[in-house]
């Protein structure tokens, strides 16, 4: 059926309007029903939170979190114990996350406004090593992976404090507070914010909770990182397909996701987990991202997922424009480890993709630089340290 985009429907003066006479779902609308008690989610979104498999008292990062469906599901799986840092680049969307967390009475969620492409803090060390890190990766190839984009410079005095404003177990929170160039956010602050959110503006007509900007986080800060990436959303159903996507826009989306993934790799600690998900069926944003991840970061490996509801990923590769453009996908064994939700399958879900990575030891001896010179260096992502 020919139709128009959602924006088009509200803004255009002419076009085709569509009236839905047959419901896609038999479920009645749950909008504003049992607010704070239930939050409707697509099946693959719920599966994603379980695949992250968060444990109580862990530090979890949700890099693109609004409106907070997966963030809150993760916090609930952790029984609200530990820390879930939820980022989004939009101020209003961070408010949405805070509102949802407050409605659900979850206090372990810290939501910040931050461009996920700048989520690794820039430190003295990383500035010094920029020249090296732009040209080296774990295989000695040119890499954008370890390049850190223009975040603010901060003193590297936060070694013991994994997350801005958060003192991990066993570390004195006062020391942490003093050593961090950011605001310390105590549990009490979070509870106060949650109350403000639930009760609305008080007598003083103050607005609800504040939205904090974050300057990013130190490398190796999180036990688990979820990157539920912004994508072409080609899996969303029902959708009035407006054919706005082009090959170029899809390629652009894929590049954007790789850059975000590079940040995730730096922020997760060795031994940790990264979960990457999208709501698109475009393999360039799914299987090709996984291929990039596995080929670029030798310390990453695909992990089995629980629960398994979707099907396997795509095997092989695709070539476009007489071989001028090639996308590499997965091997058969790799494809069995990811979940691809095909909207035409019997699962009857939106199109979705989930990959889970185990993170091994990140330190790799770099033997050669680009010119083949031997480098006596111990290379850690984002840092090059002379031995
Ligand atoms: C797929 S949605 C996330 C859905 C969310 N995880 C959930 O389950 O409720 C992608 C989100 O990424 C955010 N986003 C896009 N680019 C971003 C960036 N550079 N940094 C942070 N967030 C970004 C968008 O505002 C959007 O809210």
Image: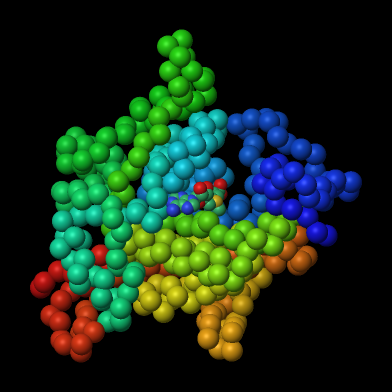
Which quarter of the image is occupied by the C terminus?
A: bottom left
Is residue 37 positioned above or below 65 on the image? above
Q: Is residue 38 left or right of residue 198?
A: right
* Horizontal and vertical percent position of residue 104: 55, 33
Q: Quadrant of residue 219?
A: bottom left
* Horizontal and vertical percent position of residue 24: 82, 51
Residue at 80% of width from left, 59% of height from top?
2
Residue at 52% of width from left, 32% of height from top?
99
Residue at 64% of width from left, 36% of height from top?
38
* Horizontal and vertical percent position of residue 64: 47, 51
Residue 17 in view (yes/no) = yes
Is residue 211 positioned above or below 255 on the image? above
Q: Quadrant of residue 142?
A: bottom left
* Horizontal and vertical percent position of residue 222: 35, 54
Q: Is residue 269 left or right of residue 181?
A: right
Is residue 384 positioned above or below 326 on the image? above
Residue 330 in view (yes/no) = no
């Amino acid at each position: 059926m020919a139709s128009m985009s959602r924006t088009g429907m509200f803004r255009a003066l002419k076009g085709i309007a569509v009236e839905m006479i047959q419901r896609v779902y038999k479920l009645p609308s749950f909008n504003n029903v049992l607010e704070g008690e239930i939050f409707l989610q697509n099946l693959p979104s719920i599966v994603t939170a379980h695949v992250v498999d968060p444990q109580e008292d862990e530090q979890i990062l949700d890099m693109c979190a609004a409106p907070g469906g997966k963030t809150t599901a993760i916090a609930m799986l952790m029984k609200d114990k530990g820390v879930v840092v939820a980022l989004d680049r939009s101020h209003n969307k961070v408010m949405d996350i805070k509102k949802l967390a407050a409605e659900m009475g979850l206090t372990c969620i810290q939501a910040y406004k931050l461009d996920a492409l700048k989520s690794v803090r820039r430190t003295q060390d990383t500035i010094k090593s920029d020249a090296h890190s732009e040209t080296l990766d774990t295989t000695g190839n040119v890499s954008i992976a370890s390049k850190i984009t223009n975040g603010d410079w901060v003193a590297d005095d936060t070694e013991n404090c994994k997350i801005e404003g958060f003192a991990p177990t066993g570390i004195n929170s006062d020391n942490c507070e003093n050593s961090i160039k950011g605001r310390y956010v105590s549990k009490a602050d979070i509870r106060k914010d949650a109350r403000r959110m639930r009760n609305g503006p008080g007598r003083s007509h103050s607005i609800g909770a504040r939205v904090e900007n974050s300057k990013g986080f130190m490398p190796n800060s999180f036990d688990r990182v979820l990157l539920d990436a912004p994508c072409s959303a080609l899996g969303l159903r029902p959708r009035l397909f407006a054919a706005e996507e082009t090959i170029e826009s899809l390629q652009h989306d894929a590049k954007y996701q790789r850059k975000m993934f590079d940040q995730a790799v730096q922020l997760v600690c060795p031994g940790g987990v990264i979960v990457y998900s999208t709501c698109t069926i475009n393999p360039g944003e799914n299987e090709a991202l996984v291929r990039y991840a596995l080929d670029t970061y030798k310390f990453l490996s695909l992990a089995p997922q629980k629960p398994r509801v979707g099907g396997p990923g795509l095997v092989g590769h695709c070539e476009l424009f007489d071989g001028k453009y090639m996308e590499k996908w997965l091997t058969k064994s790799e494809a069995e480890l990811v979940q691809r939700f095909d909207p035409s399958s019997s699962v009857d879900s939106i199109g979705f993709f989930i990959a889970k990575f185990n993170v091994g030891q990140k330190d790799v001896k770099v033997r050669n630089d680009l010119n083949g010179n031997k480098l006596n260096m111990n290379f850690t992502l984002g840092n090059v340290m002379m031995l």
